[in-house]
Amino acid sequence: MTKRRVPDLSVNVAGIVFRSPLIAASGTFGYGTEYLELADYEAIGGIAVKGLYLEPREGCAPPRIWETPSGMLNAIGLQGVGIERFVEEKMPRLRELNTRVLVNICGSRIEEYAELAGILDSVDGVSAIELNISCPNVTEGGILFGCDPAMAAQVTAAVRERTKRPIIPKLSPNVTDIATVARSVESAGADAISLINTMPAMAIDVETRRPRLSNVVGGLSGPAIRPIAVRLVYQAARAVQIPVIGIGGITSHEDALEFILAGASAVQIGTMGFVDPSVWRKTLDGLREYCRRHDIGSIDDLTGALSP
């Protein structure tokens, strides 16, 4: 009997070597230590921490989470400790976890993103900076940075000037042409892109005739958005030369493989971690078995390997 190769499940994204292609998505894994007693960290290649502004934020008033069919609505409002407390209190523990750390940053002005990037540039243990560009630009009347290719490029370029770290803009699905936005941030200096962010959505309590969320509109995540996310990853990966990280409703290795075959070099898992914190180990074991069954030497060989 022919002996199957032991597959290599590590990936290199923007010069960062992840021991696994599975990354914990921002906003769903806290600051990296909250799952220590629940998840198998050896199966996790990287952690994208909660989005950070310069200053602490309390976020939206409750209720701010509502379960939907095959998904979840959230309007947390980017609650966070702010960059100073993150660097002083959270990063020391993150450095002990032996995993890659992606710091997700947010801002209401381009200058905020640049300042955050400048601070993080000298912080030991930061592997990359993920740009949450689904934030409203207050100086432009509340337009979301990620919905305008030119504005997305401006944020990326401003961050590029302030850091040597790899930068990864996180793209919004709420655009007409994802390829145009992807190319715009690539030309502005992005080292990779991640997508998608949550989709704007809402739910209503018909008895009280009130919104389920205090913020009225929230972000939809979970399996309900996965087919949309796979399509957008496919289109973005065909438009750029930089690596793509796929996000959206991954619950199993089959789901992760959809993104990888569509062109993703790695994937992020978020909402499913609330349901089953063993999802990272189960998904990694499933990927390994799939590669063995198909005699795939490296998970990299499957990136963009969608048959016509």
Image (cartoon, grey):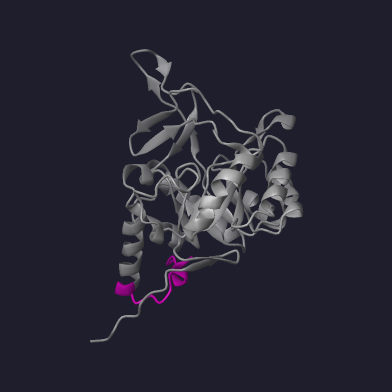
- The image shows residue 225, relative to residue 211, as above or below, that is below
Q: Quadrant of residue 143?
A: top right
Residue 27 drawn at (x, y percent): 49, 41
Query: Is residue 233 visible in the rendered structure shown here?
Result: no
> Where does the magenta region start and end?
292-308
- Which residue lies most toward the top here? 208
Magenta-highlighted stretch: main secondary structure? loop
Judge left or right: residue 27 versus residue 171: left
Q: Is residue 35 left or right of residue 217?
A: left
- Residue 293: in magenta span: yes
Q: Position of residue 293 (x, y in %)?
A: 29, 73
Q: Exactly how many numbered labels are in the figure?
A: 0
- The residue sitting at the bottom extreme is 1
On the image, the x and y values in percent for residue 160 come to 73, 54
**Is residue 266 depicted above or below 78 in this figure?**
below
Image quadrant in which the N terminus is located: bottom left
- Does 29 sit above or below residue 20? above
Closer to the camera in the image, 82 or 28: 82
Q: Is residue 19 magenta?
A: no
Query: Which residue is found at the position 39% from the left and 60% from the top?
Result: 43
Whether residue 2 is visible, yes or no, is: yes
Name the residue rendered at 52%, 26% in the picture: 60
